[in-house]
Structures are given as structure tokens and as C-alpha cells.
Image: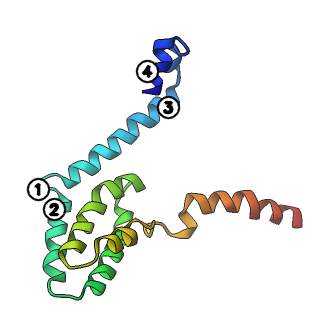
Amino acid sequence: MATALLLVTGVLTTKDMLGETGAWNVVIWFSILIFMANQLSAKGGVIPWMQTAIKSVIGGMSPVLVMAILVLVYFYSHYLFASGTAHVVAMYAPLLLIAKSAGVPVMFAAIMLGDDWCHLPIYHPLLLRACYGFICPRLRQAD
């Protein structure tokens, strides 16, 4: 919406927009990742199959144990995806539905799955920035 307003008012031209090749590169690759994640969730895809398999295994277990299993599945499944966004798009809702059907309180399940458990600290972008910005310069000064 904001981009359209900038184009209509003449602040930006189409030539300016087409010149931003890095931005277009990100848009194209990001849309491909989201498309692929959506296809995994489509009827007959891997995610519905996995959802059925998990439901059959956790049938009759306590909600606490179900949530522990789902958090572990969510944690380790992020290694199968090219991006964190694709992982969330494909896995978050199916696992949340499994938790709900097993009797886990929905808010608890949403927080447990949504609390960025899928990243190990050494790979987390915020931690890397903090390390680079604060720790690494201090180490260089100590030398």
C-alpha cells in the first residue's frame, strides 16, 4: 500500500523500483520458500501424513507428555527446512491442532511452539549480532 502511494505521488518511479535488484531477489526466493512450505501442507503432502502418524503414536498419552513430544518434533524438524519462515508455515498449525486434540490448553501449546524453540543459540541471528557487536570487539581489544 505504501509503495503504491509512493508510485502514485511520484516519489518513486518504476525505474527506481526495478533498479532494486537485491530486493527483488529476496522477494522471489522468499516466495519460492513459502510456496514450497505450503505444498508440503497440501492434501497428500508430507505434513498431513506426519500429522496422522503423530496422532496415532500419542493417542491416550497425557497432555504434558504430548506437548513434550510435539516440542521435540518441532525442534528437530527445523533442520528439514531451508528457512525459519518455511518451517513455521508448514509445521506450526498442524502441531498446534494435534496439541489441541490431545487436550493440551491451546494458549500453552501456542506459546510452547511459538517461543522460538527451533533455533539453537549458536545459530540464532540475534545472538550472533550480539556476539559480533559486543563480545568480539572486546576480545580483539584484549589481544
The residue sitting at 69% across, 62% down in the picture is 131
Residue that mark 4 sits on:
4
Q: How much space separates mark 3 and mark 4, taking CA atoms?
A: 16 Å
Amino acid type for the residue under numbered disc 1: Gly
Image color mode: rainbow
Q: How much space separates mark 2 and mark 1, taking CA atoms?
A: 7 Å
Query: Is residue 98 left or right of 132 when viewed as pictured?
Result: left
Residue that mark 1 sits on:
44
- Marks counted in the figure total 4
Give SS at disc 1. loop
The disc at residue 23 is 3
- Locate the C terminus and report the quarter of the image it occupies: bottom right
Rendering coords of residue 60 (x, y %)? 15, 87
Give SS at disc 2. helix
Rendering coords of residue 69 (x, y %)? 30, 80
The residue sitting at 35% across, 58% down in the picture is 88
Q: Residues within 10 Å of mark 1 (few under 14, many from 20)?
A: few
Of pointers 3 and 4, the one earlier in the residue sequence: 4
In the image, residue 34 sits, relative to residue 84, either above or below, namely above
Rendering coords of residue 137 (x, y %)? 80, 59
Q: Are marks 2 and 1 in contact (CB under 8 Å)?
A: yes
Residue 120 or residue 8, whichever sits in front: 8
The residue sitting at 44% across, 67% down in the picture is 115
Q: Are marks 4 and 2 in contact (CB under 8 Å)?
A: no
Query: Is residue 128 left or right of 12 when viewed as pictured?
Result: right
